[in-house]
């Protein structure tokens, strides 16, 4: 009898990688349709592909202005791509299974675990439901707050559409907007717009595990009458590091940007003191993977742009909508370095030892991410006549799925745009996924 060949199954990470590629291709085909453009013309495949890649990879770099080039249908397609990319292709697919009442298999649970970098398979369906409910709740709150401005400015129906689109885009850290080529620059002194956008960006970028732990901590305080300190001690180590690093980067970034740009007449120099602080804070928020611009990025001083590229590389926290190397990864690297300087054998964070395997994964993430940025920057400079700072800023923005631009992406040649698309794709699925089938750093679940 002929030997039966074993059927080969795709691994979880192969499914994630191919899933994102499939959604990008489908989005491209939809955006090519005449009904997707405002002028009812067939959009060239390269432009549709770039837009779809930017939306699914929740980056925000564009070759066509989202508000003026695309029709209502095209914008709706982009919005669905953003939501799918923000939540993750696998999460959305499995959510459809759950809504249809079908049973989730063990393989699907394992794939979901890899897709959202959950600490363990157990309770993964419950966590996914929590993420979906939390996502739509926060996006709904954001859209409701936006509506106070947009409905007054554009009328009820258009105002609601603007509110929903920007709430989803901000929460998913996509940075795509339909307000025009100037993004949030005309609203730099509008407290409602700036703070609501910041709130959505931070909530999406801080990570779903932080949400989960925060809700569980409040539940313990309310039901078990335990102290705040006791509840804090019960949260995951990953949550503690994510919150600490987020606060440090937000405050530190605001201070640095404020002092670097306060005398620059093209950015913060001509603003009131209140607006300087507000816009320095917003720039610190948006640089860590959001992509909304309240000041012209091309007008930033070179030192500020370079500092911004560093913030992009750090990015948000694991298990969220943000990109970058992740706050937890950087913290592990820093504390490992500190342990080495003190001649300590173990890496310790918040009085907990970090396993060597986690330190190795953190090193791998940083090495592969920095290598990708370095190589792609060289390629972009080799194929386009651009300086080092602009090329680095653009590549870091793409790889770390930020979406801020120093007005470079629209003028790149075909080779340059292909490089940026590859950067966005690698940044969304993760350099580790592409190389060694590992996307995010996951810390121990027990303290």
Image (spheres, rainbow, N blue to C red):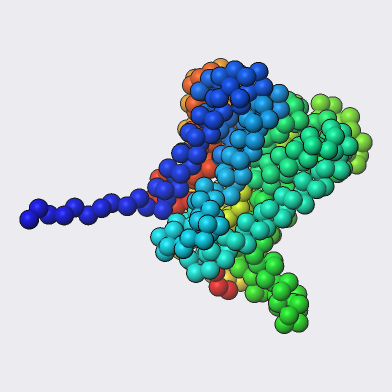
Q: Is residue 211 above or below residue 252?
A: below
Instruction: Report the residue at 58% width, 63% height from top.
Output: 127
The answer to whether 200 appears left or right of 320 in the picture is right
Residue 111, percent from left and from top: 45, 56
Hey, which quadrant is residue 390 in on the image? top right
Q: Between 33 and 171, which is closer to the camera in this rendering?
A: 33
Query: Is residue 281 in sight in this rendering?
Result: no
Q: Between 282 and 172, which is closer to the camera in this rendering?
A: 172
The answer to whether 164 appears left or right of 90 in the picture is right
The answer to whether 269 appears left or right of 96 in the picture is right
Instruction: Report the residue at 52% width, 47% height from top.
Output: 89
Q: Quadrant of the N terminus?
A: bottom left
Q: Is residue 296 above or below residue 332?
A: above
Hey, which quadrant is residue 407 in on the image? top right
Residue 279, percent from left and from top: 81, 39
Q: Between 350 and 1, which is closer to the camera in this rendering?
A: 1
């Amino acid at each position: 009898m002929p030997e039966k060949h074993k059927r080969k199954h795709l691994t979880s990470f192969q499914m994630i990688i191919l899933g994102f590629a499939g959604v990008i291709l489908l989005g491209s085909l939809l955006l090519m349709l005449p009904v997707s453009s405002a002028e009812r013309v067939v959009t060239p495949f390269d432009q549709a592909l770039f837009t779809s890649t930017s939306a699914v990879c929740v980056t925000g770099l564009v070759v066509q202005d989202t508000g003026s080039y695309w029709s209502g249908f095209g914008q709706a397609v982009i919005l669905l791509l953003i939501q799918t990319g923000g939540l993750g292709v696998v999460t959305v697919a499995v959510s459809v299974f759950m809504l249809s009442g079908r049973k989730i298999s063990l393989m699907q649970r394992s794939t979901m675990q890899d897709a959202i970098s959950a600490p363990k398979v157990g309770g993964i369906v419950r966590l996914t439901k929590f993420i979906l409910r939390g996502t739509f709740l926060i996006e709904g709150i954001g859209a409701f707050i936006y509506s106070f401005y947009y409905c007054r400015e554009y009328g009820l129906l258009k105002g609601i559409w603007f509110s929903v689109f920007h709430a989803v885009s901000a929460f998913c850290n996509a940075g795509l907007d339909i307000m025009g080529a100037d993004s949030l620059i005309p609203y730099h002194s509008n407290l409602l717009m700036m703070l609501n956008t910041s709130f959505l960006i931070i909530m999406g970028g801080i990570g779903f595990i932080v949400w989960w732990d925060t809700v569980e901590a409040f539940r313990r305080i309310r039901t078990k009458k335990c102290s705040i300190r006791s509840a804090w001690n019960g949260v995951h180590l990953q949550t503690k590091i994510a919150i600490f690093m987020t606060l440090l980067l937000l405050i530190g970034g605001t201070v640095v940007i404020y002092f670097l740009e306060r005398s620059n007449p093209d950015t913060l120099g001509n603003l009131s003191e209140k607006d300087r602080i507000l816009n320095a804070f917003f720039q610190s928020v948006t640089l860590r993977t959001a992509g909304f611009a309240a000041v012209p990025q091309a007008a930033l001083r070179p030192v500020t742009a370079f500092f911004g590229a560093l913030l992009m590389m750090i990015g948000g926290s694991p298990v969220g909508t943000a990109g970058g190397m992740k706050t937890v990864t950087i913290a592990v690297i820093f504390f490992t370095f500190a342990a080495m300087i003190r001649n300590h054998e173990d890496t310790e964070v918040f009085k907990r030892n970090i396993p060597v395997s986690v330190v190795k994964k953190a090193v791998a993430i940083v090495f592969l991410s920095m290598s990708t940025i370095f190589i792609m920057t060289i390629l972009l400079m080799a194929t386009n006549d651009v300086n080092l700072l602009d090329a680095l800023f653009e590549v870091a923005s793409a790889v770390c799925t930020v979406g801020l631009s120093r007005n470079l992406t629209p003028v790149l040649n075909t080779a340059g745009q292909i490089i940026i698309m590859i950067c966005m794709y690698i940044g969304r699925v993760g350099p580790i996924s592409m190389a060694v089938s590992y996307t995010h750093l996951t810390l121990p679940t027990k303290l």
